[in-house]
Image (cartoon, rainbow, N blue to C red):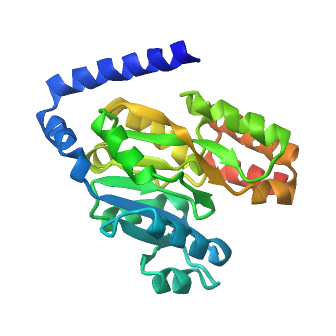
Amino acid sequence: MLSEVLSIHRQQSAFGQQLKHTSRSYVAILSSAENVKLSIIIPTLNEAAAIGKLLAYLRQHTSPETELIVADGGSTDATTHIAEEMGALVLRCRPRGRAPQMNAGATAASGDILYFLHADTFPPEGFELQLRQAVQHGNGSGCYRLKFDLPHWFLRANAWFTRFDVDALRFGDQSLFVRRGVFLQCGGFDERLTLLEDQEIIRRLRRVAPFVVLPQQVVTSARKYKEHGVLRLQAVYYLIYGLYRSGVSQRRLLKVYKWLLS
């Protein structure tokens, strides 16, 4: 494992050196990374049960200048009310969907680092410093390893594999941080996608600047696994990913996904 980590570090360092010779503006940004502003963007739809706890946690573990942005897709519960009461900037997005909501959040954000986070996912303590350091070390984007809040053997195994930098193992629940310039250069999230928009953008982000999987873990809710069954839901995810990689349309993917979970 140590040799694997050192190998990845060497690769990232080499890529970082290449960027230093090809992008003066990127070097200038990196040199002041300690002072960059963080904007946390949370897409929501009927997350009243989760959003308050997350925002309280984020405010406790971030500096006062950090932006908390809730990009809502038309919640019919108290999500937006709770978020506004807790001081977050609330965007009422049209059209709804994770991709357009996250793009709307990025447009409204003023931070140099955009951090996309699900409403049921908690980043590790010290995450603000960790993200700043990741950027300072030359990374344009990245995510955390994953941990579920349910002690199920399969979920533990599933989470263990998220330490490897392989696109097939990237999940939106791992959260995603991106330098603003890198996000703009890659064109943001593809709003044509209803499913797997996170995996799609990561492939484009890699072409612009180094991507890193940070060694700490985010803790995410296993509520969907509890609802549908761990093995059943994971099998659905694997099938949808395979169909997506085979070129099946988003319309058909969504139809199959809903049918399998109905």
Is 125 positioned to the left or the right of 230 in the image?
left
Residue displayed at 42% across by 70% down = 69
Quadrant of the drawing holding the N terminus: top right
Residue displayed at 17% across by 39% down = 31
Does residue 189 lie above or below 79 as drawn? above
Q: Specify whether residue 85 is in view.
A: yes
Does residue 9 lie above or below 146 as drawn? above
Does residue 88 lie above or below 5 as drawn? below
Residue displayed at 50% across by 79% down = 83
Q: Nearer the viewer, residue 226 or 45?
A: 226
Measured as percent of width and height from the top left, residue 27 is found at 17, 35
Does residue 256 lie above or below 64 as drawn? above
Residue 19 falls in which quadrant of the image? top left
Quadrant of the drawing holding the C terminus: bottom right
Residue displayed at 46% across by 42% down = 201
Measured as percent of width and height from the top left, residue 146 is found at 63, 43
Measured as percent of width and height from the top left, residue 52 is found at 58, 76
Measured as percent of width and height from the top left, residue 63 is found at 35, 64
